[in-house]
Image (cartoon, rainbow, N blue to C red):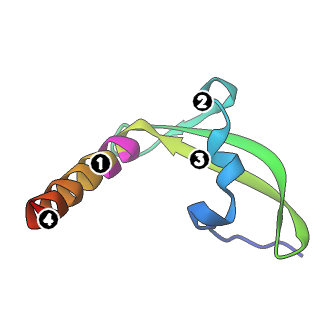
Amino acid sequence: MNVVASAKHNQAEELLEISLDDYKYLYTNSKGNKIYGYRTKHEFFGKEFTTVVLYSAASHKKQMESYERRKAKMLEKLG
């Protein structure tokens, strides 16, 4: 049986600790962003699955900018 799914960060926290040096270049998307991946085995819901963790510097940058905006807004409300 083949399954394609995504996991939340809190479902596989240890996979987020893998060094980007261990990732391999996979492809460049239509926007010109390089996509890297790391393939491993990981247990979800008591069953082991082949798992690919993906990384894009462009997505990371976007997420960090969004995080900083939300953080600033929250600090403004608290202060």
With respect to residue 51, does 59 lie above or below? above
Q: Mark 2 vs mark 4: which is more N-terminal?
A: 2
Q: Distance between the residues labelled 3 and 2?
A: 10 Å
Q: What residue type is labelled 2?
A: Leu
Q: Give the range drawn in magenta.
A: 59-63
Residue depth check, mark 2 versus mark 4: number of the one nearer the observer: 4
Callout 4 secondary element: helix
Could you tell which of marks 4 and 1 lies nearer the N-terminus? 1
Which residue is disc 4 drawn over?
78
Q: Is the Cβ of the residue at disc 1 closer than 8 Å to that at disc 3?
A: no
Q: Residue at image x 41%, y 36%?
A: 57
- Front in this rendered view, residue 13 or 23: 13
**Residue wearing tag 1:** 62
Residue position for label 3: 54
Ranked by sequence position, the earlier of labels 3 and 4 is 3
Q: Position of residue 15 (x, y in %)?
A: 69, 48
